[in-house]
Amino acid sequence: MTFVGANPSGAEAAFTGRWKPLVEGVRLSRDLANEPANVIYPESFVARVRETLVGTPGVSIEVLDEAAMRKLGMGTLVGVGQGSPRGSRLLLIRYRGVGSPDAPTAFVGKGITFDSGGLSLKPGAGMGNMKGDMSGAASVMGAVVSLAKSRAPVHVVGVAALAENMPDGNAQRPGDVTRTMSGKTIEMVNADAEGRLVLADANEYVAKAYRPKAIVNIATLTGAVVGALDNSYAGLFARDEALAARLIAAGTTSGEELWRLPLHKDYAERMKSDIADIRNSATGQGPGASLGAHFIGFFVDEATPWAHLDIAGVNRSEKATSLVPKGMTGFGVRLLDQLARSE
């Protein structure tokens, strides 16, 4: 690569130290999401990320398999994947840079490596694109790779909640009640509202094990956000005003822009269950993206600053642009990288 300018050696050093790791992180996210689901599934996702981070200073890796998650009572993450022969995983990558604060920021991504809809089967048209339903988790890992390899002075925990949602005879049934590791119960009324289920256990685990100062979820969560924002913005939902402002600023700086959508107290009523603490889907028409966000926030203590990014409209591009090739976009890597550096 040739650098041209008043100080080409300085430009090369800046690129190698700051921007090359970001490029690697974006590429990792896109590659993970573009791979077929018979290549990238929970176990191989973990292996690919491990390989990328070999020898990187400040990094520690934790992986929970199904046996460990069952022992902890993580019924929702395990439950989503129980219709697949490929076991679920929870992958946590901690990166702590020199001089960084004691408490990390947690980035928690939905990692459904293929989403058939489970027993609430999706239509066949376009189902092949559901290999990219782990784009949130892929972008979390890309952001951690960028921060760690550039040796940023930040402290983050990247979490990938990994499962394959398949309609096997052992799959969850609509009407089943599952339990998270905290003991909260969920009436699972729609097997195709599975991303929020894996995030419930992932949020509770990272909160207990790592005590983060803030939690940011990122997920290809709803078709409703596509109807609201198309592919121009990702949807932002937040209970904390300072975190929301930082995310919007990071989106503007990174070029991965967000549009804030509402979280209203009345949404709790729409998600009430007669037999559990909450339902995973409301019946009838309603603000689907906001209801999904409300569900995820139900599993984060209200004292913890929390935000959720719904990237269902921006994780895939039908045509190439100057920054994004056709296919999975890696949306969120630049945004989360910028957010972590903005403290």
Image (cartoon, helix red, strand yellow):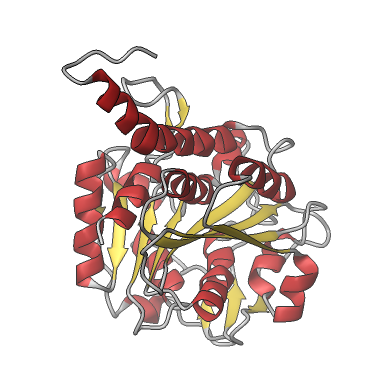
Q: In this view, does 138 lie above or below 105?
A: above
- Residue at 46% of width from left, 82% of height from top? 272
Q: How many labels does the image show?
A: 0
State which quadrant residue 339 falls in.
Answer: bottom left
Q: Give the camera-side residue of 203 and 9.
A: 9
Residue 286 in sight in this render:
no
Residue 88 rendering spot, x and y as whole percentages: 72, 59
Residue 253 rendering spot, x and y as whole percentages: 20, 43
State which quadrant residue 13 falls in.
Answer: top left
Residue 61 in sight in this render:
yes
Residue 242 rendering spot, x and y as whole percentages: 20, 69
Quadrant housing the N terminus: top left
Outermost residue to the left: 6
Q: In this view, does 5 lie to the left or right of 227?
A: left
Q: Give the camera-side residue of 72 and 238.
A: 72
- Residue at 62% of width from left, 34% of height from top? 128
Q: Is residue 85 left or right of residue 193?
A: right
Residue 163 rendering spot, x and y as whole percentages: 67, 55
Q: In this view, does 322 lie to the left or right of 173?
A: left
Q: In this view, does 116 lie to the left or right of 270?
A: right
Quadrant housing the C terminus: bottom left
- Residue at 32% of width from left, 24% of height from top? 12
- Residue at 69% of width from left, 59% of height from top? 89
Q: Is residue 302 above or below residue 123?
A: below
Q: Give the camera-side residue of 186 and 173.
A: 186
Q: Is residue 332 above or below residue 3?
A: below
Q: Give the camera-side residue of 283 and 96.
A: 96
